[in-house]
Image (spheres, rainbow, N blue to C red):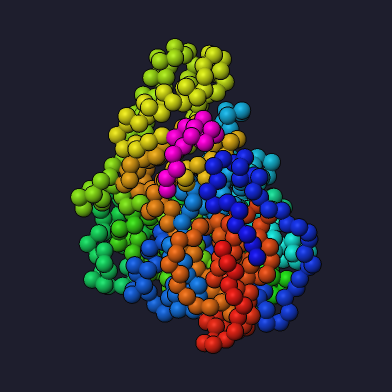
Amino acid sequence: MIRRLCRYPIVAVALGLLILSRAGATESSSPPGGEVSLVVVIVVDQLRGDMPGELMDRFGPGGFRRFYEEGLVYPGAVMRFAPTSTGPGHATLATGALPAVHGIVGNQWWDVTRETAVNCVADPAHRIVGQSVSFARGVSPRYLTAETFADVIHQDSGGSSRTVSLSMKDRSAVLPAGRSGKAVWYSKWTGQFVSSDYYYPSLPGWARDFNARRMGRLGADIWELSRMRRDYRFEDRDDQPWEMTDLGPGRGFPHRLSDARNQSSAVRFMPLADRLLVELAKDAAAEVDLGKGPATDVLFLGLSATDYIGHAYGPDSLEWEDNMLRLDQLLADMFNWLERYIGMGRVIVALSSDHGVASAPEYLLSRGQAGGRVDTPGMEADLRTFLRDRFELEDDPVLGVSYPAIYLDVAALRAAGLDLGEVERVAAERIEKTEGIATVLTRSDIMAQRVRSSRVNDRVVAGFHPERSGHLFLIQEQGWFMDEDPHYYATNHGSPYDYDASVPIMFLAPGLKAQVVEREIGTEDFAPSITSILDLPAPRQATGMALAEIRRVTQRGSYNSPAGSSQDEPRSE
């Protein structure tokens, strides 16, 4: 049994004291014929928890429906931390830990000692392979400070297990791969799939061949509706004024990739992106015989199209609806391929998301609901001027911003003889005067455990890391968009509210009882549940636990356990 030690950490120091270490090394295992030999993990970027259920009557028989009819589904999973963004979301799903432990506190943050912004997977020591663009940053998992489920499987196998992690985003491929896997991702600069020399000395042949065969002929791709327009719930929501035309191939159907100003970038804003990734996954699996080796292998797919489309058009758009229908069919096609490739009786499939999404503020306003866009440039300029005048500073008191966090220049404030906690308090009060800002939590209050407990505040505190988090944590009003550029996207995520924190968790595994469980669980339970199905320990730093309904795989060849079959009692929480 895996014990839960802490769900709501106050600070990283407290969390660190609660981490379990594995008591000892396990014997190397190799799956005999008929046992699970491949774990397929799918993370659909920006898939809010309610989304699959809302469209279930529109889905076909083999995609999301298969999870609901043959698998274990938790539609009410939540991210128990903030910010609710891609880097932290993937890291928590992969490690079973919260940001205070795994260290990924955002897609980027500020290094206050070096006074520079840090991307969560950047590493100049490891160059990019597979492209000639010299200015592209190097990439590795060096900032990830926790073990992933893939690392556990690899270690248990004595190094025989292989992990291939693919995504349209570098961070979505790198973080789940951990330190033992191989990662390949898409480069918007060149329109090619790439990697770094942390993983390969040169791009593997299967990725190189895919680039040559597939990626050079995308310009003719057209995204048309997959059904008659009258068959869509959102048939009248095409070409809305708040949609972001600069990012993708236009606002109205049909969307032609050739119409985009930058086709390599615009590919990501079409269902084509996910289709390409699944095609690449099939090539990779066939080339390395993934799932056909001496140990259980892992295939990770970070499907990013839903995120890009949601950002550009919003989750209440015709584009979003058609993409979801296409995604459902893509899942069905993938399951059919897995059946042919290795047999679903030898596969575990786990699906979740890294975060949810809000509706576009303008859409909310059109329906009489509250919403808006925070004037972040104006707020930042006002804060800098205010603090300079208030404390008679010559130097800029703000080091940088990575929303929802603002980082103060600690060195400048200390040189001026100022108390950091007092500056934080005054700055928070000033920011709270900005329209659309609900409240601001300060680093000093979090460290001193002075933050009033609430569902929203607890998520911010759980995402706090003493070395990487900022000094001011902004929480916007519900329905308000907050980012460096208020008009870069139609909508966004990142807040601690339920619409951004809600995601689904789903499992298909031989012998796993089919059921839909309505209770709330955390995304930190995802990784321990995967390893539990394999009868392996949770990742070392995991604070999540194997879910009560997860049972040891005892039946082979069938996902839906036969009625009346005897199984061990589920693990208790």
* Residue 365 visible, this angle: yes
Q: Is residue 19 above or below residue 50?
A: above
Residue 56, given in percent of the width and then of the height, sits at 36, 72
Residue at x 58%, y 67% (from the top left corner) = 572
Quarter of the image for residue 317 reads bottom left
Q: Is residue 509 above or below residue 527?
A: below
**Residue nearest the observer in this picture, 331 or 93:** 93
Q: Which residues are magenta?
A: 441-455
Would residue 217 be found to the left or right of residue 193 on screen? left
Residue at x 38%, y 63% (from the top left corner) = 50
Question: Which quarter shows the C terminus?
Answer: bottom right
**Residue nearest the observer in this picture, 154 or 334:** 154
Question: Which quarter shows the N terminus?
Answer: bottom right
* Residue 196 visible, this angle: no
Residue 410, given in percent of the width and then of the height, sits at 55, 23
Residue 196, given in percent of the width and then of the height, sits at 65, 50
Quarter of the image for residue 281 reads bottom right
Residue 236, given in percent of the width and then of the height, sits at 22, 62
Report if residue 466 lies within the magenta region.
no
**Residue nearest the observer in this picture, 472 or 246:** 472
Residue at x 47%, y 75% (from the top left corner) = 515
Q: Is residue 16 above or below residue 308?
A: above
Would residue 87 be found to the left or right of residue 221 on screen? right
